[in-house]
Amino acid sequence: MPPRTGITSGRAIAAAGVVTAVLAGMITAPVAAGAQPAAEESSRWTLATLPDTQFYSRYAFDQFEPRYGSNPYQVQTEWLGQVQDDLNIPLVAHLGDVVDRATVESEWVAADAAHKALEDAALPYSILPGNHDVRNSASHLTDRDYDLAEEPYLQWFPPERAAAQSTESGRDETGLSEYQIFEAEGQRYLMLALAWRVSDETLAWAEQVMAEHPSLPTILTSHDILGVESDGRTATSGTNGDRLWEELIRSNDQIFLTISGHNHGSAYRTMTNDAGNEVFQVLQDWQMAYEGGNGYLGLFEFDLEHDAIHVSAPSPWVAWKPADSLTVYDQPFLEAPNEQFTLGIDFEERFSGFNAEWTAGDSDLPSLTQRAREIILDGFEGVPPVTAELPGSAEDYPRLGEDALAHWRPGIAETGEDGVLDEGAAVPDVIGGGDMTRVSIEESGSPAAQPGDVTVRREGHAFSSDGAGVCFADSSGERYSYLSTAPDAAVNDADFSAGYTIEVFVYLDEAWTADQNAWSKAFNRTGNRSRMGMPPSRYDYTTGAASLGFSNLREFQWTELPQDPTVGDKVSWSGEIPLGRWFHVALVNDIDDARTTMYVDGAPILRNATGTGGMSFEEGMPWIIGAAWENDQASNGWHGCVGELRIADRPTEQTEWLIHRPDVDDFTADAERVEIAEGESLPALTGTGKPGATVVAEGAVTGEAVVAEDGTWTLEGELDADAAAGTAQQAALDAAPGTYAFSLTHGFGERRSEARAGEVVVLADDDPGAPSPEPTEPGADPTDPGGDPTDPGGQPGEPGQPGGDQTSEPTADPGAPGQPGGEPSPGASPQPSDPGSGPGAGDGKPLPRTGSDVLAMSLAALALLGLGGGAVYLARRRSAEG
């Protein structure tokens, strides 16, 4: 059963505490990680690595720079140039995948500019091509099979560019692999950088380079050496890594460290070579993390006197970004045990077999890892705290009014035994009546589906007020079930010409595998693109209008056909998504910006669709949940759960999303206080609030109302003198003339507003009219000790005139809070304590029945505001007859 993720207790929580992994599933909450660098001064130097910059290059100009003014690749290299002396960096090593699409020039322009920053700073770098940097990366091809004259990599990073650096260097015959000899702390080291798939000839070249420099400790970089298991931490290796180990690494004792990228994640391991010595292998690739890697790079601090290599992963990009753009995913360092760690190595002993003269340098430097931390954090104020509140009830979510076209909520579905959603049963649409009904197995076309495959589980995303999901068991390519709207559902023909927002909560089962479940879909707007005017395409030509799916690389994929179908398929991609947890996904199409942005748990992903607007559709074609749709039929079931799903026909703000909570303090009452004659029933209280919230009266008035979808509420309460009195003697009065206090709260379940005070004034039977409040100075006695209880102001007026003293203030001393007032004077009702102030305040004399009563009321209200009074008074003026 999928767990309810997020915070399990508490009303307000910091989002940083809720999210324990970022979109890639690799950036986790800080944890202790290995031995800390020694504080003593020592001979030290730092090797910097740049893993998989492909998304930085690809989205530099259409995503990063419009949003931020720069891109992570540029910021990384500029930062390294600035700190090279502070961190004693002699060389930077790129691990391959410089760009994402080898034939797109703009990506090479971005990469070129980034490396120009290193060249301008006179900081040497090693570079090599990954699979995305060559035109044909098929694994059966090697560097000798390429048409080298046509390779863009060699046009942008030719041998001449490498030779222009200050290090001694060289390239193999293809020009794709290279070596650099650099000096650090008085010793020389060899960096071997091998291309994506190297030939036997290139391996022989690498052997020759080492043979020509037999005393140099060697670091080997290549794009694909080490892999990582599905746990995201355990190191493994594939065919290419095994080949390099067997044919090059194990037999060459000079190679003591390998560093690679390509495989998404972080890992390291220790191997033993033929000489019986340790070889460290490290994987660094964060491209599937937030914003394509979020600017994380590698720092390897070589502490030569304390026999350690300290590995860390800072992000100068996070520290550089504007503070108001930061999210909870913007952590300045990665600190999981597979991202920050220490490798123990006795350098002198390890290198003694091929360099008996090796010694540590003479410099006395403090911890360079700590220095890097200080530099990154200098001026960085941290991620702004973002609070999120758990829902107080099932109704605790923002409404969108008429802009919401459908909202399916599994939590209110009727299920059979063991929560099974039977064939023909539905998940209700609480807005448009377009319920999602489970399609029969026969109609679905699945040859393997079972009746019990679809269940509703009353557990979901922590911030979904519905708190449930419809779950699909044992789904695969042939075993699938799905829910569908009826052919005449209004939402089938939804017009998104003004844009849209689609929100959904989804869960990926921990048993998901790429072999069985890749390219499954959580929901679809069905139809067939080939009939909607889309140009023929290799991909998705016969799929529905739009769908949210999950790729073989564990990415969310949103594919849509815009309102103008001739522009073709538009796709947004998330980073790598961990299994076994719930996510909220929002898809916001802004036609003014011509962009669809995917948000995962509130954070915008990097690879969003541009040049899009609205959505094409086929009339009468349904929306479905739980399967893919292609060639006019379902397939490829969703292996997990789908929670509540809402569709709106405009782009919405984040505060309107289902993961946010309405403001419980945003409610009103229509009156200031209630006055009724003795024996008269309490009138209904009315006001406005948040749809679905409850308004609860306690104290002298008791009752409860639900705020309607139009934002109004009506509370038919009862006057409870016993609750107001607090003593048996006063309870016996049974709503006798006096003032009774009560309070109102507004909210959802236990998530409620601050209590607001109100009062009911019960007038005596012989009171000919209701008095107007008379403002007094704060703390002043509102009665006039010298006043005459028989003052004509308290007498009835002439026949045909309103009762006397309708504008006067009662002259009785007020009772204690929540209790009836003191003894009333003849012709006047008890007077509540009034903290107001204004003309005539405190003199105990009534205001004449002229326009001044309005003035007095206005001034009293203004005085209340001036005093910061939080009480809201409910007033309903009512005349007592005869």
Image (tube, rainbow, N blue to C red):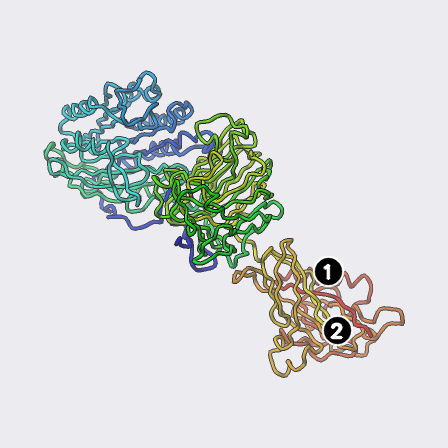
Residue 339 in view, yes or no: no
What crowding class fits label 2: few (fewer than 14 Cα within 10 Å), some (14-19), or many (20 or more)? many
Q: Would you say 253 lies left or right of 555 here?
A: left
Residue 114 vertical position relative to residue 32 in the rendered view, above or below: above
- The secondary structure type at the circle numbered 2 is strand
**Near-viewer residue (795 or 700):** 700
Task: Find numbered disc 1 in the image and state the secondary structure of the residue it sits on.
Answer: helix
Please state the horizontal and vertical placement of residue 92, each as a whole percent of the image.
29, 31
**Is 843 situated above or below 366?**
below
Question: Which residue does the numbered mark 1 point to in the structure image?
Answer: 858
In the rendered image, the quadrant that contains the N terminus is bottom left
Residue shown at the point (58%, 57%) measured from the top left: 692
Q: Quadrant of the C terminus?
A: bottom right
Disc marking residue 677: 2
- Around disc 1, counting alpha carbons within 10 Å, would you say few (fewer than 14), some (14 to 19), or many (20 or more)? few
Judge left or right: residue 777 versus residue 382.
right
Distance from label 2 to label 1 (Cα)? 25 Å
Given residues 712 and 828, the one toward you in this image is 712
